[in-house]
Image: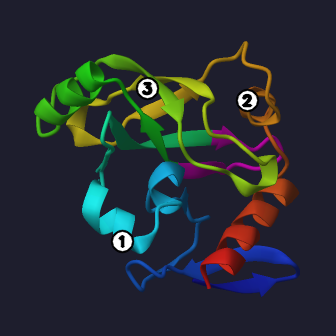
Amino acid sequence: MFWKKKKNKLTEFKCSECGQVHPEWPALAFSSPANYHILSDDEKSVIGKLDTDFCEIHYEDQIDRFIRVTLTQKVNDACETLEYGLWVSLSEKSYSDYKENFNNQNHETGYFGWLCSNIAQYGDTSSIPCDVMTKSGNNRPEIFPHENFDHPFVRDYYDGITKKEAEKRINEMIKNVG
């Protein structure tokens, strides 16, 4: 991705995924859950299974299951919101239900999940409890961190962040991708 800046304001970016120039902020997306990311290349090929929406890690004694989700972060002093593409772990029952209904345009339900993406500005954000809400139309589910869970990421989700902080996060993500 690259940014064109005007008077220190982000105005547009070229997406590394599609190659198009977009006028809005990019989503801060993670290509895999942290649990998969930390595996060695050999472990990924032997026990891991990853595509754009699902991930499984087959250990000897258990299978960890993850789905790709979105989170919308309120930005207090801007018209935009900051979008995240994150991963959560689900129970076997919830994962199976979601996978079975993945192509069902009318499937709307909720699951309990654990956040499994580490957002750099917050240190360890894995294992934040979340409500996972599916959407009709086959859009990715949206997560809502449990408000009573004491973590800076959860507080910022409910209180909002500044435009300056949002742009800092975008620039950090771009710097770490390139």
| 87 to 159, vertically: above or below | below
Q: How many marks?
A: 3
Query: How far separated are the C-alphas under marks 1 and 2?
Result: 35 Å
In the picture of the structure, the residue carrying the numbered disc 2 is 154
The quarter of the displayed image where residue 32 is located: bottom left
* CB within 8 Å, label 1 to label 3: no
Q: Closer to the camera, 12 or 139?
A: 139
Where residue 129 appears, x then y in whole percent?
A: 58, 23
> What residue does disc 1 label?
42
40 within the magenta span: no
Q: Residue at x 53, y 52 (%)?
A: 34
Helix, strand, or loop for circle 1? Answer: helix
Residue 131: x percent and y percent?
Answer: 49, 21
Q: Where does residue 12 sit, x and y in percent of width and height?
A: 62, 78
Give the colouring mode of the picture: rainbow
Residue that carries the numbered disc 3 in the rendered image: 132
Which is more N-terminal, label 3 or label 2? 3
Q: Amino acid at mark 1?
A: Asp
